[in-house]
Image: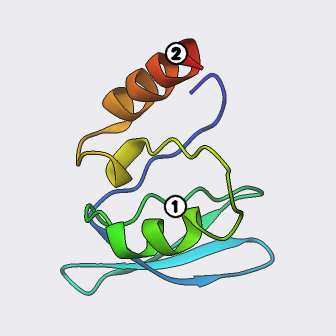
Amino acid sequence: MKHHIKVVTNTKLEEITEKGIKTINSKFQWKEYEADTVVLALGMRARKDKIEELRHLIPETEVYIIGDGHQIGNVYSAVHVGFDTAVEI
């Protein structure tokens, strides 16, 4: 691992500690990971009601919705839509 990035899937985050995280999997096995940075990618459900609520907080502001807010997908599709949107702006 060149950049020391550990991807953990199908696991529930139980706690973020000073040293990293504590998790539990579907077999109820606990595991701790040391980390100085934690990135969470949770769920695959567009929260369009929250998007609509937030996008109207600042009047006359153009809002571009990407990622799962736009269409359920993966990181690749979210980055692709983000790039395409940036090009259009």
Circles 1 and 2, Cβ within 8 Å, touching? The answer is: no
- Please name the residue shown 26% across and 87% down the image: 28
| Residue type for callout 1 | Leu
First-in-chain label (1 vs 2): 1
Quadrant location of the N terminus? top right
Residue 80, quarter of picture:
top left
Circle 1 — which element? loop
Nearer to the camera, 71 or 64:
64
Residue 22 position within the rendered picture, expressed as x and y whole percent measured from the top left:
54, 79
- Please name the residue shown 49% across and 24% down the image: 85
Give the vertical position of 25 relative to 58 (above or below): below
Give the vertical position of 74 relative to 24 (above or below): above
Q: Is residue 57 left or right of residue 45?
A: right
Circle 2 — which element? helix
Residue that numbered label 1 is attached to? 40
Nearer to the camera, 52 or 21:
52
Residue 73 position within the rendered picture, expressed as x and y whole percent measured from the top left:
24, 42
Residue that numbered label 2 is attached to? 88
- Please name the residue shown 32% across and 57% down the image: 9
Circle nearer the viewer, 1 or 2:
2
- Please name the residue shown 58% across and 67% down the image: 56
| Residue type for callout 2 | Glu
Nearer to the camera, 86 or 67:
86
Task: Classify mark 2: residues with Cα within 10 Å, few (<14), some (14-19) or many (20+).
Answer: few
Residue 78, quarter of picture:
top left
Nearer to the camera, 21 or 54:
54
